Image (tube, grey):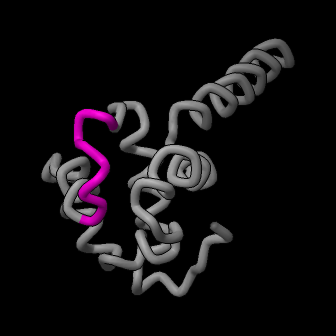
Amino acid sequence: MKKVIAVIFTTMLGLSFVSTAAFADVAKGQKLYQKKLKKACGFTGAKFAAKHTQDEWEEIYESGKFKEEVHKICPKVKPESIKDKWVKHLFDFCYEYASDSGNVPSC
């Protein structure tokens, strides 16, 4: 019985590490904005994320038009210059600091 519990506990612990790495990260999205988009956009991440509400950002992301929306907000940023692996992180950043969230990023 102790071995079964130990195996279950070990499995759960291992899965908790794997599953957290699979999710997007607000802080990573903030860093991506600062490094890749801020200069081309010409304004802070707070202003960028506040262009829409959380619901609007979610609708844009789910419709697959996130890259195009970034291009609308920042015309110097071409949609093809945004890597697919960045999109989820950038979306999480925008969602976290949207105009109706009450949160303000430090960038």
Q: Position of residue 100 (x, y in %)?
A: 41, 86
Specify the quadrant that holds the C terminus: bottom right
In this view, the residue in front, 24 or 6, is 24
| Residue under the image location 63 percent in, 53 percent down | 27
Specify the quadrant that holds the N terminus: top right
**Residue 47, relative to residue 21: is it above or below?**
below
Q: Position of residue 24 (x, y in %)?
A: 50, 43
Q: Is residue 60 magenta?
A: no
Image quarter for residue 72? bottom left
**Residue 89, relative to residue 95: is it above or below?**
above
Magenta span of residues: 73-81
Q: Position of residue 73 (x, y in %)?
A: 27, 65
| Residue under the image location 18 percent in, 51 percent down | 68
Q: Position of residue 80 (x, y in %)?
A: 24, 34
In this view, the residue in front, 32 or 20, is 32
| Residue under the image location 42 percent in, 66 percent down | 95
| Residue under the image location 52 percent in, 32 percent down | 22
> Relative to residue 96, is residue 83 drawn left or right?
left
